[in-house]
Amino acid sequence: MIRVIIERVISEGKLDDYHALIRQAKNKASNSAGFLTGEIFHVKDNPNHVIVMSCWDSFDTWEVWAESEQRLDLLDAMRPLLESDEKVTVLESSNIKS
């Protein structure tokens, strides 16, 4: 299992447009093989700084979604709303035993 963290900074006045697109993205991702859960957060003191956290059964299933035409089309629609490119971090479980 992996977790994917996507950070985006939304341009001033574009948050409502972004919310509409991110809802579409979450709905489409949830129908993708390997998607387990997803949540959307705003940084407490900066609502335009958005963190999307999703959980996938494997890196391979995430990669299929990440490179899918559906996600790339949504990302193209989001780009004009963003102050900068999104930052994606993939986390995998550690094998450390207690």
Image (cartoon, rainbow, N blue to C red):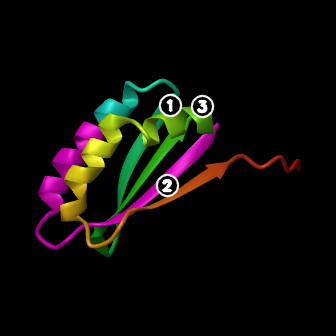
Q: Which residue is mark 2?
A: 5
- Whole-Å distance between the Cαs marked 2 and 3? 15 Å
Query: Which residue is disc 3 drawn over?
Result: 57
Residue at the spot of label 1: 36
Tell whether label 3 touches label 1 (CB within 8 Å): yes
Disc 1 residue crowd, few under 14, some 14–19, many 20+, Cα 10 Å = some
Q: Secondary structure at mark 2?
A: strand
Q: Looking at numbered disc 3 in the image, what kind of residue is underneath it?
A: Asp
Front-most of residues 51 and 31: 31
Residue 7: where, in percent of width, then height?
A: 41, 62
Q: Horizontal and vertical percent for residue 18?
A: 20, 55
In magenta, the rendered stretch is 1-25
**Residue 13 horizontal side relative to residue 77, left or right:** left
Q: Answer with the quarter of the image where residue 9 lies.
A: bottom left
**Relative to the observer, which residue lies in front, 79 or 8?**
79
Q: Residue at x 31, y 31 (%)?
A: 28
Can you tell which quarter of the image residue 56 is in? top right
Quarter of the N terminus within the rendering: top right
| Rendered view: 2 above or below 44 | above
Tell me the residue at 26%/45% (across/down).
Answer: 74
